[in-house]
Structure formats: C-alpha cells, structure tokens
Image (cartoon, rainbow, N blue to C red):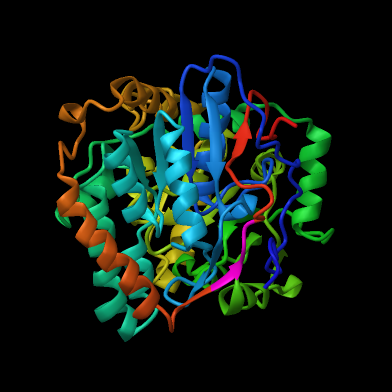
Amino acid sequence: MPPNQRSSERLAPIAKPNHSSTQANPLFKVLIVSPVFPPQVTVGGGVAVTVGALTDKLSERGCAVSVLSPRLYNVDFGTSTLYPGFPVQFPTIFNIRLFYNSIRDADIVVCPDNAVMPFLLTFCHMLNKPLWFNIHTNVRHLLEMTGPFGRYFSAPIVDGFIRTCANLTARTYTTSPSYRDVLVKRGYRVDGVFSPRIKLAIFEQPDTEADILAARDWLVDGHDIGDRNLLIYAGRFSHEKRIHLLAEALPENCALAIVGDGPGSAGDKVAALHDPSRFVFVHRGMVAQPRLRILYKASEFLVSASAFETLGMTVAEANICGIPVIVQSATGFSTQVAHGQNGFLIDFEDRKGARQAIKEAIEARPSAEEIAAVMNSDSFWFSKLPSLDEEVIKMARIGGDKSQWGSGYIPLWLMLPGLVLFYVTFWVMGLPFNKVTNWADRSKVGPTVFHAGRLTPKC
C-alpha cells in the first residue's frame, strides 16, 4: 500500500503542516496523541472537540502544541472490528519510533482514549515525561452492546486494559462526576473531572434573526410545520444513541430534525428515518460548531435518547444557546440536567410515557433567562471544576517528579514484560480484528505543530 493512502471518509481540509516550524521560547512543549482531531473546526465527537479546544487554549497561553493523530495522517492507523468506525493507531515499528522521539522532545503528553497507551506510558516513565490521560468514552458499554462476544469477551478485556493504563499515568481525568463514579466502582484511579467550559465559548456568540430563521427552514427542508415545536438531535449516528426512539416518541404537535453522521449500518438506519410526511427530517453530515450553534437556536428543544453518556456535551451547548433539553435519564445527562429548570429527564424506552412526557415538557418549557440562571449558579455542576488547560500546565510544571505522579515511581522492569505481551497479543490475537488501512507519509515524519491560531497549523 503506498504511503499516505487515505480511507474514504469525508473530512474538512486542513492546512499543510510544517514539521520544521517551531515556536520561540514556548511556555511548555505539549504533545497530544489522539485517535481523532478536528480538521480546522469540524465537529468530530466529544474527544475531537476537546483536543481541538485544548490545542487552541494551550497555544493562546504560549505553549507549542504538537499533535499525532489519524485525522492528521501523520501516524499509521487502521480499523478494528471490535470498535468499528473509530480510527485505531497501530503499534507499527514506524509509530513506535515516532512516539518515542516525539515524547522525548515534549514536556508533557496528553492522551485521550487510545489503543497505543502501553507504549506511551512506558516511554513517558522511561523519559520522565508526565502523561495526562483523559477518559472520554465508555468503551466497555459500547462493546457490550455489540452482542454476546462483545459483552463477555472484548468488553471485559478492553476495560481491564484501559483500567490498567489509567492507573499507571501521572494524571487521569474524566468528563463528569457521574462517569467518574462509574469508573471508580470499576477500580479506576481517577484524579479529577475537568470543566467543559473550554469547549463551550463558541456557543456564547450572538447570531442574527435572519440566520436563525434560515437555519430553521433548512432543518425542516423548507416544509411548513405550522405551529409545531421543532426538536433537534445533533451528534453521532450510532446504536447506543437509540435515535429511532426519538421518532417513535414524537408527539403530533412536534417536528424532529436529526443532524449528524455515523458509519455503516448505524448511520444508514438513522438516514432511513427521514419522513417529511411524519415531520421527521434527517440531515446526514457533521456540521461545524458555529453552524451547530445556529441550529440549536432555530429549535425549541434538544432531544436525546442515548442509553449512556460520559457527559453528553450537546446538553451544555444547547443550554448556553438558551435552549432546554429533553433527554434520557442516564449517566452524564443526569449530571447536567436540573429537571424542570434547564431541561427534563425522561425514559424514552417507554414510548407512550415518553410521548406524554415531551408534551408536558413543552408546557413547562423554561425560558432562556431561567436556563442562564441555572448555569450561572455557584451550585451548578461545573462551576467549580478546574479548566483542562490549567491542569495540564500545572502537571507540566511538576514534570518528571514522579513522587507527585498519580502512579508514583514504577520500575521499568515491571512495565517492559507487559509491553512485550501487549505487542505480541495485539498483532497475533488481534490479527483477525485489526487492519492497517492508512500509512503515514514517510517523507514528512513528525507531529503537526500548532501555534496560536484557530486550529490551523502554522505554515
């Protein structure tokens, strides 16, 4: 397979990176190793939005940020049938050397959920570089939903793998207090929860009434929906989101707009829900955050029937836009929603009950002022949480002092056998499941360097 061959997926264009570019006297050199990353500002899920916003914020604060990610095509990556639709960085010889050299040149490494964590951990302990691990995804629950094989084989194995990695880092953080409690019960060491505000500033910007009216017309494909309330779902199309329940619970006085995308059969099933005669409109394709902000404002409610979330950022996004939510009573959502004040928690599995609950929510709809009062309250759930960029910088200042790492000092002779076992297992037992589909460009080896500027590599 030739270098830099790309899989067939729709991505926003990115500026051509300049690997030789450096920032003079940076505060810290931060390396982000992420399975996903937003090309410019395209929405790509919670992980992508987080690492994109963190890149922005750290750059603004004077850090030089380097990123290795399949979405930037500077690492070898592929797919795994254990977790379809999610790019996997593989431990190829090229990647292993790339990780080592990049970590050696950094002051701190930031990594969300990632298949190559054992190598990152070992190299960080070897080179005395702190690794900051962000747990965004409830991978165990995702795998349990794939069937008996996932529930009884891959889910416990993968969960054990992630738990071991999390307990060996300098810091492990997650996205919400409710998901932190879930992780702690499973035996994870979780050092804290970071505030989502780093990702929300863009939703505080004003928009014109003309743009909002045009967005509403787009959401309903130009159809006349009369005085119906417009409900919007925005996000990934995947099985655990249970988007079909939204259509099944839709009251007669409502219309439903579904915006987002997803791979394979999950995405196709959601696309098949499009039915203007029932006032259900599906728009397949992720949208940029500025556009998403206008779509929220063009709707009466955000809705989601997702079975579980580690946080569910769309709730906070919609609330900042002054829009209340109607969501499943589930982990993540329950952290954010004060029932009746900024939204409503209901059970979408009870179709008849959900339909009635939506009608009641419409009657009791809180105003934008009431929602703002809830979010600006000192008792609101993230009002006192630390910012991610500040915590990363604090850890960078600690640097190689392992007495202050969450893991403490770990002898390398204990880590290296596990690393070899992981490498052999990944390529031998994982051979039926894993496939390399894209090779990094060998002529331009190294991470993409981001300087001050909105997610645009400095050329």
Tell whether 168 sits left or right of 11.
Answer: left
Most common secondary structure along the magenta stretch: strand
Give the residue at the far top of this rendering. Answer: 25
**Residue 239 at x, y = what percent?**
48, 72
State the image coordinates of residue 265 (x, y, percent, origin top left): 58, 79
Residue at the spot x=50%, y=37% of the render? 366
Q: Specify the quadrant that holds the N terminus.
A: bottom right
Relative to the observer, which residue lies in front, 349 or 167? 167
In the rendered image, residue 455 lying in the magenta stretch gets the answer no
Image-based side of 222 in relation to 88, left or right: right
Q: How many labels were placed on the picture?
A: 0
Position of residue 157 relative to residue 30, above or below, is: below
In the image, residue 432 sits, relative to residue 306, either above or below, namely: below
**Lateral position of residue 168 relative to residue 292, left or right:** left
Q: Is residue 93 above or below residue 128?
A: below
Inspect this view and state whether residue 174 appears.
Answer: no
Boundaries of the magenta span: 436-440
Looking at the rendering, which quadrant does residue 424 occupy? bottom left
Residue at 48% from the left image edge and 65% from the top image edge: 241
Would you say residue 438 sits in the magenta stretch? Answer: yes
User: Residue 351: x percent and y percent?
Assistant: 44, 72
Is 343 in front, or is 32? 32
Can you say which quadrant of the picture contains the C terminus?
top right
Q: Is residue 153 left or right of residue 213?
A: left
Q: Position of residue 380 (x, y in %)?
A: 35, 29
Q: For the point 15% across and 43% down, which residue is it?
A: 410
Does residue 126 appear in the picture of this structure?
yes
Q: Quadrant of residue 214?
A: top right
